[in-house]
């Protein structure tokens, strides 16, 4: 891979792609979130220095963030923010093939860990 070259990926394709910050949120049974909703976006790189992961969903620590309800105010707020920064968001139903997932509210309760960025 050339330096600066961007390759789209999904956190679930390679186990090592899920960083340490997400270990407490990641469950190997992605089936728990099937039918929940996530935000698909244009590819964007992980903010961690040296990390080559490129997300195609709204993620945190390489986990696809999911919400139970399609009209959840936080889902809509995050999708709107992604639209404002040009990421072309689309709210879709989560599928296991998208990669490991985390409930938005579990992520929030864990302090909002993001790979390479300190949570609140």
Image (tube, rainbow, N blue to C red):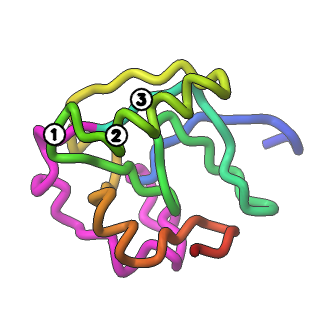
Count neighbours of disc 1 (C-alpha within 10 A) and say few if under 14, some if 14 to 19, many if 20 or more. Answer: some
Q: Estimate the spatial distance between the alpha carbons at disc 3 and disc 2, rounded to whole Å.
A: 12 Å
Mark 3 near mark 1, Cβ–Cβ under 8 Å?
no
Provide residue 73's location: percent of width, then percent of height: 30, 40
Describe residue 59's horizontal placement relative to residue 47 as left or right: left
Kindly identify which numbered label has been placed on residue 69.
1
At x 52%, y 71%, the residue is 113
Provide residue 21's location: percent of width, then percent of height: 52, 76
Of callouts 2 and 1, the N-terminal one = 1
Whether the magenta-drawn stretch holds residue 36 is answered as yes
Question: Element type at marker 2?
Answer: helix
Which of 112/24 is in front?
A: 112
Residue matched to label 3: 40
At x 41%, y 29%, the residue is 40
Which of 59/120 is in front?
A: 120
Whether the magenta-drawn stretch holds residue 39 is answered as no
Residue matched to label 2: 75
Q: Is residue 97 above or below residue 114?
A: above
Q: Estimate the spatial distance between the alpha carbons at disc 3 and disc 1, rounded to whole Å.
A: 15 Å
Describe residue 43's horizontal placement relative to residue 111 as left or right: right
Of callouts 3 and 1, the N-terminal one = 3
């Amino acid at each position: 891979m050339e330096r600066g070259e961007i390759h789209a990926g999904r956190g679930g394709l390679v186990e090592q792609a899920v960083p340490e910050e997400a270990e407490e949120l990641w469950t190997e049974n992605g089936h728990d979130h099937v039918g929940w909703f996530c935000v698909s976006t244009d590819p964007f790189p992980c903010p961690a220095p040296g990390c080559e992961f490129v997300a195609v969903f709204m993620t945190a620590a390489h986990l696809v963030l999911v919400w139970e309800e399609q009209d959840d105010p936080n889902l809509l707020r995050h999708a709107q923010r992604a639209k404002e920064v040009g990421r072309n968001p689309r709210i879709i139903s989560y599928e296991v093939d998208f990669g490991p997932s985390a409930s938005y509210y579990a992520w929030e309760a864990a302090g909002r860990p993001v790979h390479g960025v300190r949570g609140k």
